[in-house]
Amino acid sequence: MIYLPRVEPIVDFSTLTDAQRHRSKMMGRKGRPDASNVMRIMLKFPQAASINEGLDIRQDHHVLTMRMFQFTCQRTLWLYDCEYLWSRHRLSAQRDGINDDDLLAVAKGPSNTRLKWLDDVFANAADELYFEHRLSDETWNAMHAYHPEAVADAIGTYCVYVLMAAFANSVGAQLEDDVPGYRPELVDLRQSGEQRLRTLSAPPAGGYPTRLKPVEPADYNQAQITAIKPLRGDKIADTKLMRSFLHFPAFVTTIVSFILRQKDCLLPQRLVHVGGLRTAWLYGCENVWAQEKAVCRTLGLSDADIREVAVGSSSAKIHGADKLMVAAVDEMHTNGRLSDETWSGILAYGEEAPLDVIGVHALYTYMSTMANTLGVELEDGAIGFSEQERARPWRGRDGR
């Protein structure tokens, strides 16, 4: 779907502020006057767009073939109904030998009979992350057989386009004149009403099976040392979570820019971690939930408040800014877009705050899907899902 525009792209690059000029340079080809509408809109968020630094590096150097990348990317964009980015990527997919029949199969999802072997594996990966919030054993094994870093790059591709879909949909990016939107058969499929509901049973007690143990600091190689260096002195650097991620140093390099931005963003830290807590709940990630629950307690949330974050935006007991942040996460998780009311509320924190909110959700989507996939154990002494939290009904399509 193409939404009404909320933010227009920059047209006259002679009017760029110093911050926008710096961001334009950092964005390279994506920050030029001939760049896409969505990237010229992102230039209006020059500080918050620092999250893209790690993304751009990895997206240009991932181990996936362009065909694998396109299948995971396009399936994610279809699940979040981002017509703008789907349509732009359709053109690049065609250059990679993917035709419209292939893309129709991607849109049909796992029920299609056209996609075979690795095409199907990488398209289906987006479904597993979206619906089940982790990669299955079958997908894990197939990707690992292809390349040891393919799992991280598939999860990274999914999470990049969770962010980009929420951004493009929320700012109302408009199609360029030379980029057609959904083809008629895709419009028919979208309107068929046969979309699979996003439901999930409670994650297993004790967490998911561990696939990779945390790397011990004494065993770090140079790539791992370089990847974790920007977080030196931060508690998160020594956690089982980050040390497990270090099996994929490039993955860590990507999320470091998110972590650093969330510490220096326009949002109060309480809202950052309420957003992280809600995202971890929706993705059923006990490790990240425990991490964020501990931080939220230091920021003034009671156990009762934390349980209401689990209830979500439907809760009558969560109010004010906390409710705004929970609503934002729920909207991105369910609809891939911030509503008018939530967008307006977030702007109270500054013009760039909407991208900061989208970035928080993307960061914790990264951490939760990877933690679930790797089966990262709880930190020593951490408190995961309490009996009271597990006792409430888990979640349906709207997170309730």
Image (cartoon, rainbow, N blue to C red):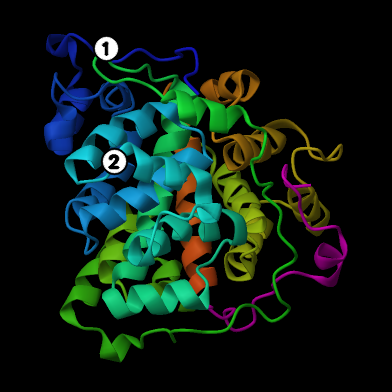
- Tell me where the magenta segment starts and ends, as one range: 375-400
Any part of residue 101 in sight: yes
Dominant SS in magenta: loop
Q: N-terminal of the two: label 1 or label 2?
A: 2
Decide: is 2 above or below 159.
above
Residue 233 visible, this angle:
no
Mark in front: 1 vs 2: 2
Amino acid, disc 2: Asn
Residue at 54 percent of width and 70 percent of height:
372
In the image, what residue occupies the spot 51% across and 45% down? 108
Question: Is residue 394 shown in magenta?
Answer: yes
Front residue (pair 82, 359):
82
Question: Image quarter for residue 236?
Answer: bottom left
Classify 119 as above or below 349.
below
Q: Which labelled disc corresponds to residue 99?
A: 2
Instruction: Let me know if residue 29 is in the magenta part.
Output: no
Mark 1 = which residue?
A: 177
* Left or right of 47 on screen, residue 357: right
Q: Which mark is residue 357?
A: none
> Which structural element holds mark 1?
loop
Residue at the image point whose x is 28% and y is 16% from the top: 176
| Occupied quadrant, residue 58 | bottom left
Q: Looking at the picture, which amino acid does disc 1 mark?
A: Asp
Q: Nearer the viewer, residue 18 or 66?
A: 66
Side (left or right) of 163 relative to 16: right
* Near-viewer residue (98 or 334): 98
Residue 273 position in % (x across, y down): 58, 50
Percent across and percent down for residue 238 are: 41, 76
Q: What count of labels does the image hold?
A: 2
